[in-house]
Image (cartoon, rainbow, N blue to C red):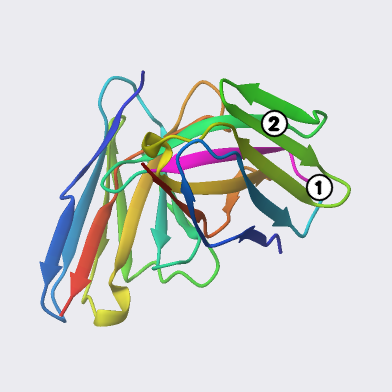
Amino acid sequence: GAVVSQHPSWVICKSGTSVKIECRSLDFQATTMFWYRQFPKQSLMLMATSNEGSKATYEQGVEKDKFLINHASLTLSTLTVTSAHPEDSSFYICSAPGQTRETQYFGPGTRLLVL
Amino acid sequence: KQEVTQIPAALSVPEGENLVLNCSFTDSAIYNLQWFRQDPGKGLTSLLLIQSSQREQTSGRLNASLDKSSGRSTLYIAASQPGDSATYLCAVYNFNKFYFGSGTKLNVKP
């Protein structure tokens, strides 16, 4: 089946630095990818929709200047957390749709800890 | 705004027991509802998808029901096994978005 990978699987960084997370569709192309954030014991919350060749669409309340999304190719989307702060510590998951949009393939997630 | 709630947040049962996980949602205007399994360090795996016009879906030892009018879904797991230990997420899909519950963490003890 279709596989979505994420890199890194976990990252620790100092407050004020930027962190880039990659999301790749390994054996299929994805013109759209989705980025979610999950805080402990809370739901996955959609942050933004990444669109290949155009600007990302952000959900209400998500700062687009803080969470930079680049969908450089049909198999790669990146999320950069700029000037990270401890409150950005979370589990970030990406997904890509299958043949139907309601079919989603999820990456394994990236755990970010900002000290 | 759609809100999805899952009860209980955690559940520990001995191997072999049948169990029920609950999911409720506030807006009945959904396209479908899915149950996912989330394992540590791995992505989400879709277990069952119920279209809004359906009442239930079955896959092996899993059975999911949907009562759209009351905003409820249940996931029934028969004869639980230690390998079923994971976090189970309920998600409703509408307007091209998934709305997830916070999950039920299941531990099946050998």
- For residue B15, which quarter of the picture? top left
Check disc 2 and give the amino acid type.
Ile
Q: Residues within 10 Å of mark 1 (few under 14, many from 20)?
A: some
Residue hosting label 2: B50
Tell me the residue at 67%/62% (across/down). Answer: B3
Considering the numbered disc 2 on the image, is that residue within a helix, a strand or a loop? Answer: strand
Chain letter for mark 2: B
Q: Which residues are magenta?
A: B29-38
Which quadrant does the C terminus of chain B fall into? top left
Q: Where does residue A49 sit, x and y in percent of width and height?
A: 46, 49
- For residue B77, which quarter of the picture? top right
Along the line of sight, the residue nearer the viewer: A71 or A25: A25
Check disc 1 and give the amino acid type.
Ala
How many angstroms separate mark 1 from mark 2 (CA)? 14 Å
Q: Is residue B36 magenta?
A: yes
Vertical order, A97 against B19 (above or below): above
Position of residue A48 in the picture relative to residue B30 (left or right): left
Mark whose residue sits in front, 1 or 2: 2
Residue hosting label 1: B29
- For residue A107, which quarter of the picture? top left
Tell me the residue at 60%/47% (across/down). Answer: B91
Tell me the residue at 35%/50% (across/down). Answer: A93
Tell me the residue at 22%/64% (across/down). Answer: A112
Considering the numbered disc 1 on the image, is that residue within a helix, a strand or a loop? Answer: loop
Q: Where does residue A63 sit, x and y in percent of width and height?
A: 41, 71
Position of residue A59 in the picture relative to residue A106 (left or right): right
Q: Is residue B55 magenta?
A: no
Position of residue A22 in the picture relative to residue B20 (left or right): left
Q: Where does residue B7 sit, x and y in percent of width and height?
A: 62, 60
Q: Give the mark, 1 or 2, whose residue is nearer the N terminus.
A: 1
Chain letter for mark 1: B
